[in-house]
Image: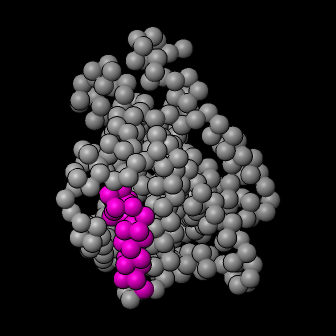
């Protein structure tokens, strides 16, 4: 289904008024993410919303204006943040809209947009480092390590900081893609919950019942193969891809487990207990990711819906 023109009759606000309102919302969210770290994490999940919401109602021009005004605000506040905003929010939002207009499933659109953004950034990063002669990402991590060593001298954290920094460096782009992915999910999900706002892009139920296509396992195998490479750039790209795919399959595994609980009418107390154990034991995330892979291969939720036991 192609995304049709916005239904302005259901939304009395003019283009100018909506652009100004969403620009103000975007600037408030940017201010929170830049000044209040903990609250900023939550606010960052909805950073694409003003752009997406504007485009759904008044087309590309309004969305460009909202994104441009937000970037200009960051230029005045701290110029490098404008570049980060463009990479993390502005560009992925536009790519997401393109996929939705090509009749892609909403969940698939968020995944494709995230992968395109992350891979493009990684490909551009390689010549940037080669031309500059130094790695700004590693410099940032070195500064972080110095701060940790100074503030946690003699602690276990200080002793393991070298290993932590190497891991953080290798999965940096995977962490970036994860942030982009969840911000697109939350923002698009919010739009789809707003009644008429989501009628052009499908129902919310299909959004969260989507299944990762089997061909994504090829990316998983590519990431595992790349981890054996000796070149640090290839290893970094493979590690980042694996990190993102692990999060993606873990999300699908979580949705599958949640579906099972609802389907079997599992007591709420037991559900909370299981989720609590998973939170306290992050290593279990790999098991949840494996459950997500099984969902892709076997269609566990579909079998439960049909009342047939999964094999």
Indicate whether 300 appears above or below 34: above
Indicate whether 188 appears above or below 46: above
Say whether residue 218 is left or right of residue 229: left
Q: For this rendering, which residue is in front, 19 or 79?
A: 19
Which residues are the magenta region? 46-75
- Residue 56 rendering spot, x and y as whole percentages: 36, 56
Q: For this rendering, which residue is in front, 191 or 13?
A: 13
Indicate whether 201 appears above or below 29: above
Judge whether residue 68 is colored magenta.
yes
- Residue 216 rendering spot, x and y as whole percentages: 62, 40
Q: Residue at the spot x=26%, y=45% of the render?
A: 196
Q: Residue at the spot x=33%, y=25% of the render?
A: 261
Q: Residue at the spot x=46%, y=44% of the render?
A: 2
**Image quarter hosting the C terminus:** top right
**In the orientation shown, which residue stands out farthest toward the bottom?**
76
**In the orientation shown, which residue stands out farthest toward the right?**
230
**In the orientation shown, which residue stands out farthest toward the left?**
12
């Amino acid at each position: 289904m192609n995304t049709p023109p916005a239904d302005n009759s259901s939304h009395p606000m003019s283009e100018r008024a909506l652009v100004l309102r969403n620009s103000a919302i975007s600037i408030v969210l940017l201010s929170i993410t830049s000044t209040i770290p903990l609250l900023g994490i939550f606010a960052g999940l909805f950073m694409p919303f003003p752009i997406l919401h504007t485009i759904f109602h008044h087309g590309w021009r309004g969305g460009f204006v909202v994104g441009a005004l937000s970037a200009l605000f960051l230029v005045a506040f701290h110029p490098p943040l404008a570049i980060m905003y463009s990479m993390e929010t502005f560009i992925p939002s536009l790519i997401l809209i393109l996929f939705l207009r090509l009749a892609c499933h909403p969940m698939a659109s968020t995944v494709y947009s995230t992968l395109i953004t992350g891979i493009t950034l990684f490909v551009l990063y390689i010549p940037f480092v080669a031309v500059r002669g130094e790695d700004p990402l590693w410099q940032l991590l070195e500064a972080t390590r110095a701060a940790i060593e100074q503030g946690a001298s003699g602690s276990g954290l200080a002793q393991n900081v070298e290993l932590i920094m190497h891991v953080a460096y290798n999965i940096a782009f995977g962490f970036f893609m994860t942030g982009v992915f969840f911000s697109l999910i939350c923002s698009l999900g919010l739009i789809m919950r707003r009644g008429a706002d989501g009628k052009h892009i499908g129902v919310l139920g299909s959004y969260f019942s989507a299944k990762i296509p089997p061909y994504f396992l090829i990316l998983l195998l590519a990431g595992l193969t790349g981890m054996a490479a000796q070149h640090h750039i290839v290893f970094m790209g493979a590690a980042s891809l694996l990190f993102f795919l692990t999060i993606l399959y873990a999300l699908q595994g979580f949705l599958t487990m949640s579906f099972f609980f609802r389907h079997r009418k599992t007591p709420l107390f037991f559900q909370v207990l299981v989720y609590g154990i998973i939170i306290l034991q992050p290593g279990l995330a790999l098991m949840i990711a494996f459950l997500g892979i099984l969902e892709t291969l076997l269609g566990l939720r579909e079998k439960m819906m049909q009342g047939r036991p999964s094999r």
